[in-house]
Image: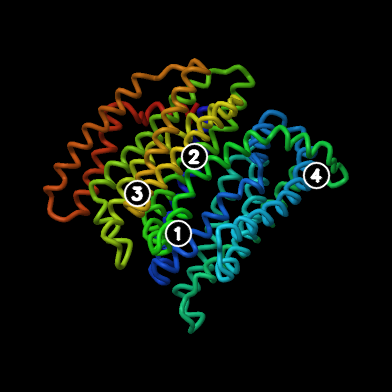
Amino acid sequence: MKKRFLTNLALLILLNLLIKPFWFFGIEVGVQNRVGEEMYGFYFSLFNFAFILNILLDLGINNFNNRAISRESGHLKDYLAAIIPLKLGLSLVYAGLVFASGKLIGYSSEQFSMLWVLIANQFLSSFILYFRSNISGLQYFRTDSLLSVMDRSLMIIFTGLLLWGNITEESFKIEWFVYAQSLSYLITLSTVAVIVRYRSGAFIHRINMKRSLEILRMSYPFALLILLMSLFNRIDSVMLERLLENGKEEAGIYAQSFRIFDAASQFSLLFAGLLLPMFSRMIKLGEDVNELLRTALPLLMVAGLSLAISCNFYRVNIIELLYIQPATHSSTIFGILMIGFLFVSTSYIYGSLLTANNNLRQLNIVAGCTVILNVTLNLILIPRYQSVGAAIASLSSQAFYAIAQLVLTRKILKISMNSDIMFKLAAFLVLNTLVGYLTLLLPGWLPGFLVLLTSCLATALLLGLIRPRELLSIVSN
């Protein structure tokens, strides 16, 4: 299992390094620079509003299905026949509740015009993720890896043509960005549906609504967990836009830094996508999950610490490099959010393990407490500190959630704290923080930034957090 984890992780990282940095830092930054903070903030707050309620399209079905198929792959047809009509019904519920919620908080007709397209995009994205959960559940990780970047690859092509292809004389509009996403999702969904149909065979004649309701009953704990996580991860920009007079502009400023934080979080999500079905299978077979945990933990934590340290020392330079006229407090928001990325990485590892062990009740209690903490802090800090306050609320919430998961893992699964790894990570943090201060003495920020990243890699090798010989041995065996 460790070999499969490492080889498929290497493929995932390669594909995502080829595609997603250009999406986040080329396309999304290019769109925001072209349309401005206020108009991008208009889109960004609506996108997150639609995303928060996205769980109504899923209700935990994707995570439930991934876990179920990885354990009982022979029941693929039955699950498809039960889940597809269920998800179609949930789509109507989702659209209705998003519309009602938008009316309740006072969205304008202009906002609703874009919101309807974003609702359709969430529908398409939800079905893509569902079909992919079948592919990864069947342990076809390489196929899933290729599909994971297909939608973004198409978006890069379509949006890139609109931004730089000179195919129209009109100024770029934020609506074009949304329509490009729609077309990309539609093509990707068609592709992934054909692949799943090929693996499963005919299943329409097996449709059983009674079974659909049984799956809904079994999956609702997953749904509650994802809804709560979406709330404390995405509600910041919605609250900024609603609580402040210049809310759209502040949401746009927050989006500048959140984009980089989200891009880094996608890297951590790759680990979770592989770890969940692997942990589930190992737990069912009674295997020692700590061996896989000890392989994944140092890899992800080294990446998280390296980004948190280097991005904080050079936060001003990075923001100025990406944006034409960034706000004065953009770099402060960026530094705070990148510290939060470290806790997000921790959550993805231990959260995947607890989910695989079906400890959803405990996870939901912790996530509920995190939502209360996040909303309370946002209500207190946003009126006083605006988008910086939202960043502080996000960091505090992520730290609480990650630490609580670590404690739960220790208490429920009786897994060692892996003190040797934790001690090495603490040493890694101290040593590279000192190196960071020394690099500030170098002329120019880019040499210092590269030296700091090199120091992080060298320190990880020196402390044994990354062991190339051991990793190569696992793969070769």
Q: Nearer the viewer, mark 4 or mark 2?
A: 2
| Residues at marks 2 and 1 touching, judged by CB atoms closer than 8 Å | no
| Residue 241, numbered label | 1
Q: Secondary structure at mark 1?
A: helix
| Residues at marks 4 and 2 touching, judged by CB atoms closer than 8 Å | no
Residue density around tag 3, few if under 14, some if 14–19, many if 20 or more, within 10 Å: many
| Residue 201, numbered label | 4
Q: Residue 276 in the image: state x and y as whole percent.
A: 57, 32
CA distance separating discs 3 and 2: 16 Å
Looking at the picture, the colour scheme in use is: rainbow
Q: Residue 109 in the image: state x and y as whole percent.
A: 59, 70
Q: Nearer the viewer, mark 3 or mark 4?
A: 3
Q: Secondary structure at mark 4?
A: loop
| Residues at marks 4 and 1 touching, judged by CB atoms closer than 8 Å | no
Residue density around tag 2, few if under 14, some if 14–19, many if 20 or more, within 10 Å: many
Asked if one can make out residue 50 in the rendered structure from this viewpoint, the answer is yes
Asked if one can make out residue 191 in the rendered structure from this viewpoint, the answer is no
